[in-house]
Amino acid sequence: MPKMKKIRTGLIIVSLVLVTLGISFSNAGMLKAYISPVPLQQITPQLPQLTLTKTITCSASQNGQSTKFFTKSPITFTADATGFTPIQYTWDDNINVHQSASNTYTKTYDTAGDITMYVKGWKDSLNFILGSCPITLKNPQIGTPVARILTCSAKQNGNDISAASPAFTTEPITFTAKPIGFAPTSYSWAENTNLIANRVLHGNIDTVSATHSLGTTTATVTVTGTDASGSVPGSCTIPLIDLSAPPAPPQPTPTPTPTPTPTPTPTPTPTPTPTPTETFSTETTQQQAAQAQAESQENPAPALNILNCTLMDDQLVVSENMAIVMRCFLEVPAPPALVTVRIIKDKYTPPEEPSQDSVIKDFAYEKSTTGKTFSFSWNGIDNYDQYVDEGDYSFVVWAKQNTGDKPDISIQNFKVYQNPPPAQTQEAIHEAAGTTSAQTKKTSQAPTPPLPSKCPGVNYPSDIESHWAKDFIKQGYDACIIKGYGDGTYKPDRPVTRFEAVKMVLAAAGIPPKLGCYTLDCGSSFKDLGQGQGSWIRAAYDLKIVQGYDKKVFAPDKPMTRAQAVAVVTKAFKIQPHAGCYTSGCGAGYPNNFFMDILESWEGPFIRALWDLKIIQGTGPNTFEPEKPVTRAEMAKLISTTGQKIKPSVNK
């Protein structure tokens, strides 16, 4: 009986379950199943709405790679949030805690071992999502000790001094010493064994000022930095423009004496009885003074003749990488003076204020100047770091004693050319300026017919025959990698733009442009790309070969620097950046010419990689000049040399 009772109880429970599922027992106890007549779509269960999972992941990278990590070199941790946007991040490696609104955090470790970086992405002030980056740190291989270098640079009136932009005599020059690899406690400056300065510092950059007399064409200033380990010498050698005497101030145009007109004898007028003189109160005198001051502000005194400027040339040729220099002399009764300096498009005519669109370059605005001489140089680049178009320009300087005074103005007109103009044009320019030279009077010879390259339908350029990079440029033409300009030239000494360099490198590495572009940006986020640029920039960006200055700016027409060019070539040709760097220079220049001017940590691994392959060289002892613009000739050599050592692999 108990057993039958248990069976009945079990059958009742099963029956209840089956009834719920649409199955029932008949009165005879026989199991009968039936299909519900309710339409299928009505009984389809309603799925609950899916909610995206909120997660945060963490990744680490060092010197352009993310597989090996070393001490003594910065590591960048990056957090990537999914399903929410953190309002703040907390980074914690059980050593330090760092809070930031940025999703990246950079840190350098001194001790090898296993490290886990935890990152909290805060959803609000109380709740967060946790992620982590576990890494293993190793000590880098011991290399040659870092060299102790003392670099020296020079500026005049805020402008860097170079062969393209020399300094002037009789005007102060600021020399700056910067130590690399050591921290001096004292500096000693001298020129021609004559002591300039000798002072005690503690690891800081030091500056000194020196002025050179007339008759000097070059100057060498030496500096010695000393610490507990000894002394390190450095020096600056600069070119000078010798001004034997300042230009004579302009002579006023003599005013012709008018012919005197006979004065008629006036009819005598009765003399009125004099009126007693009125005595003014102090209040009335103050009112008159205030009124006189207001009138003087509304009608300032005529401009003083205090400014005399000379333009050192009447034309600027952009492709020659030279600068046009304005040299000015001030004769101010009581220094300082307020000086404004601008480059203006077309020929400027005072007294109208130049429009904002016409101001191409701003050098100074009402800058307080105490010296009697000053100079400014311009290389053809505008306020937005772009080369200007050919045409007429004005170098304009305003100078005044006080804010409310009318300024004395110097306007020097000149022309800008991308390339040297023909001899006939040169002659016309110099004749207009009164500086005709014998060189421009030479009879121009008939141009040599262009020679065809191995690239079908493309001729070699006409301006490389005597250039040092002729063979490298011809190799690029023969391989259909590079092309020149519409006038048949290559302009080898002109700085290569970021777009030109990207296109040349991608073509050399066998990487095609992005196809199917319908807009100038070719679907990228960059909003400053021009016709024909988007497809190449998009292809390089997708392959992580290039990146912009921000999400919307690539600056395609800005000159590419030496470090940028090396990085683009390394990535495009799939050359592994050097790993295990413990200095920003990454040992580039090993073993006997370490580059001590590589200060950005991202530059070192790429420069070291191409150095080890003997693809690149420095510009001098212990210098690479990573921020110096690359010329089109240097770019052709870099591509040609890399292609000979590294077989390009086609990227798909």
Image: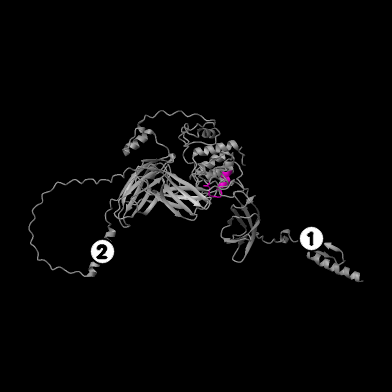
Q: Is residue 125 magenta?
A: no
> Mark 1 sits on what residue?
35
Mark drawn on residue 291:
2
Give whichever of 37, 91 is nearer the camera.
Answer: 91
Q: Is residue 603 magenta?
A: yes
Q: Looking at the figure, which quarter contains the C terminus? A: top right
Give the residue at the far right of this rendering. 1
**Where is residue 411 drawn, in percent x and y?**
33, 46
Give whichever of 242, 63 is nearer the camera.
Answer: 242
**Where is residue 45 drawn, in percent x and y?**
72, 61
Give whichever of 303, 26 is nearer the camera.
Answer: 303
**Where is residue 625 drawn, in percent x and y?**
50, 44
Seen in the image, is 352 located left or right of residue 570? left
Magenta-tinted stretch: 596-608
Name which residue type carries label 2: Gln
Residue 272 in view in this figure: yes
Cα separation, mark 1 vs mark 2, equals 107 Å
* SS at badge 1: loop
Seen in the image, is 262 located left or right of residue 11? left
On screen, residue 518 above or below 280:
above
Closer to the observer: label 1 or label 2? 2
Q: Is disc 2 surrounded by few (<14), some (14 to 19) or many (20+) residues within 10 Å? A: few
